[in-house]
Image (cartoon, rainbow, N blue to C red):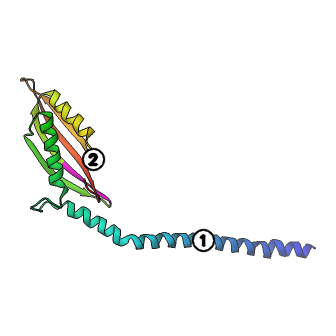
């Protein structure tokens, strides 16, 4: 009886525990392999998505057909005109590319009454485009206008602007 208890404690139970640990480790490795295979299978779609983003960011595209930059510039211009002012400067600054999207950075400088600048900000916030103010500098002038400098950030994804 004692031999049976010692045999169970020192040989059988540790063997069963090691087998369970090995089985759990195997299951974990199979899960990791499945995830890795999924990523490998998605490689072409991920590469196509990245290429689509890079094509949309091409500033040298003369037609602007494949580029989000002219579309964003046109959108900001239309927002400012709807608010009642024309930007003194509206320009593309740079883009930061990430896996599924890119951040497009723009600069807008204008002199307008505060009400028109507020209207522009409200229109931009209500827009369906992902375009937000990153930084804003306001300098009041003696003639009642405000000299404003906006640093804008827009996101563009695989699907569009």
Badge 2 marks a residue whose secondary structure is loop
Pick the residue in front: 62 or 20.
Answer: 62
Q: Residues within 10 Å of mark 2 (few under 14, many from 20)?
A: some
Point out residue 63 in the picture as x, y percentages from the top left corner.
Answer: 10, 61
Q: What number is the disc on residue 147?
A: none
Q: Which residue is mark 2?
A: 130
Q: Quadrant of residue 11?
A: bottom right
Label annotation for residue 27: 1
**Residue 142 location in percent, x, y?**
7, 23
Give the residue drawn at x 65%, y 73%. Answer: 23
Q: Which residues are magenta?
A: 100-105
Horizontal and vertical percent position of residue 161: 25, 53
How many neighbours does mark 1 have within 10 angstroms: few (below 14), some (14-19), or many (20 or more)?
Answer: few
Is residue 104 within the magenta segment? yes
Q: Nearer the viewer, mark 1 or mark 2?
A: 2
Depicted 84 relative to depicted 105: above or below: above
* Prevailing SS of the magenta stretch: strand
Pinpoint residue 150: horizontal percent, then vertical percent: 18, 40
- Counting residues from the start of the chain, the first of labels 1 and 2 encountered is 1
Residue at horizontal 51%, vertical 70%?
Answer: 32
Q: Quadrant of the N terminus?
A: bottom right
**For residue 30, side relative to residue 59 (left or right):** right
Q: CA distance from mark 1 to mark 2?
A: 43 Å
Left or right: 91 as drawn, with respect to 32? left
């Amino acid at each position: 009886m004692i031999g049976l208890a010692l045999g169970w404690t020192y040989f059988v139970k540790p063997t069963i525990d090691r087998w369970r640990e090995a089985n759990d480790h195997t299951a974990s490795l199979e899960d990791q392999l499945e995830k890795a295979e999924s990523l490998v299978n998605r490689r072409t779609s991920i590469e196509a998505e990245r290429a689509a983003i890079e094509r949309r960011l091409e500033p040298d595209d003369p037609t602007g057909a494949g580029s989000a930059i002219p579309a964003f510039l046109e959108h900001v211009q239309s927002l400012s005109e709807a608010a009642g002012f024309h930007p003194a400067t509206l320009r593309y600054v740079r883009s930061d590319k990430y896996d599924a999207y890119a951040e497009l950075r723009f600069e807008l400088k204008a002199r307008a009454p505060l009400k028109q600048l507020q209207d522009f900000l409200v229109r931009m916030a209500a827009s369906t485009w992902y375009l937000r103010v990153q930084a804003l500098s306001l300098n009041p002038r003696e003639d009642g206008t405000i000299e404003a400098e906006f640093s804008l950030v827009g996101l563009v994804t695989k699907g569009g602007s």
